[in-house]
Amino acid sequence: MKERVFTVKNKAGIHCRPSSVILNTINKEFPYHSFYLETSDGQETELNSILTLISLGLSVGSKAILKVDGPDEEKAIKRIGDLFENEFDFPPR
């Protein structure tokens, strides 16, 4: 299992649209992996639904630990961790 600490950089935090991008990427690119998120207060949850991710209330500056288990952990942790640190712009310019 690989782990990565990240900081949310999106000004509006991880709301509906970023959550959708993150979960869609997980489902399309890493279907045989399990992803978990541990927040700074010690709450750990599996990333398997948009509502679960939104309910964590990750705002700008929030730090959390992303954990991944699967056949290509290195690629998965980089790709999904980068999405959590992305500054999303909706609608895209």
Image (cartoon, rainbow, N blue to C red):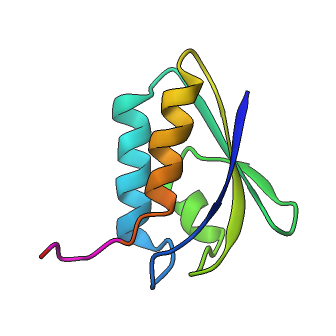
Q: Give the residue displayed 51% in from the left and 40% down from the top.
A: 78
- Pick the front one: 30 or 77: 77
Image coordinates of residue 12 in percent, x first then y, are 45, 84
Q: Main secondary structure of the magenta part?
A: loop
Q: Give the residue displayed 62% in from the left and 69% down from the top.
A: 55
Q: Residue furthest top?
A: 71
Q: Split into 4 quadrants, where in the image is the C terminus? A: bottom left
- Pick the front one: 81 or 34: 81
Image coordinates of residue 60 in percent, x first then y, are 56, 81
Name which quarter of the figure residue 53 lies in.
Answer: bottom right
Q: Give the residue displayed 87% in from the left and 61% down from the top.
A: 42
**Magenta stretch containing residue 18, yes or no?**
no
In the figure, 12 relative to 5: above or below? below
In the figure, 26 relative to 15: above or below? above
Q: Residue furthest left?
A: 93
Q: Give the residue displayed 37% in from the left and 42% down from the top.
A: 25
Name which quarter of the figure residue 10 lies in.
Answer: bottom left
**Magenta stretch containing residue 90, yes or no?**
yes
Counting labels gives: 0
Q: In the figure, is residue 87 to the left or right of 66?
A: left
- Pick the front one: 8 or 57: 8
Image coordinates of residue 35 in percent, x first then y, are 62, 38
Magenta range is 88-92
